[in-house]
Amino acid sequence: MNDKNGLAVTLFGEVLMADQLARARLSKALPKGMELSHFSVLNHLDRVQRERSPAQLAKTFHVTRGAITNTLRKLEVAGYVHIRPDWDDARRKMVAISPAGRRARDAALTGISPIISDIVEKMGESRVRAVLPILRELRERLDDGR
């Protein structure tokens, strides 16, 4: 293996391990019964402040429509999202966060914020700011390769 390939393998090994460790730590801090995928959808819906179709959500999270449908079904049963027919296209549905979903998202954020803040504090704010453009570019290049 040449040096360039070794560097790439090392980079992706670190990114994948960091992802696995972050998911494990954050999952433990979420409210009982909430999964990281649930929090991600609720957080997205809260941030965009508008309805999204399941297809749009699947594209946003780079998952299959079946996977997002499963997540949305669980969120709807919990009362965290409202799902309605699209009045312009009866084949589609539209999803919005409910007031209970906002409260659940806020509770989840309360649970995970100390973990995230602690990591930023230990690494140093300037170092985190310095690595963000690199991670953003990595994400964008990976997204271009779809």
Image (tube, rainbow, N blue to C red):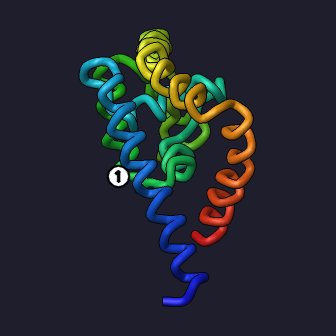
- Give 39 or 109, whichever is nearer the viewer: 109
Up-down: is 6 above or below 64?
A: below
- Give 113 or 97, whichever is nearer the viewer: 113
Q: Amino acid at mark 1?
A: Gly
Tell me the residue that label 1 is attached to.
66
- Residue 119 seen: yes
Q: Which residue occupies the extreme left position in the image?
A: 33
Give the crowd class for mark 1: few <14, some 14-19, many >=20 residues within 10 Å. few
Question: Residue 5's spot in the image, x, y percent?
Answer: 54, 82
- Residue 98 seen: no
Residue at the (35%, 52%) spot, across then down: 66
Question: Residue 97's spot in the image, x, y percent?
Answer: 50, 22
Residue at the (55%, 89%) spot, across then down: 2
Up-down: is 107 above or below 43?
A: above
Question: Residue 4's spot in the image, x, y percent?
Answer: 60, 82
Which secondary structure lies at badge 1?
helix
- Give 3 or 101, whichever is nearer the viewer: 3
Residue at the (61%, 39%) spot, across then down: 88
Tell me if 112 is positioned left or right of 52 in this view. Answer: left
For the C terminus, the image quarter is bottom right
Question: Residue 43's spot in the image, x, y percent?
Answer: 53, 27
Residue at the (31%, 42%) spot, across then down: 70
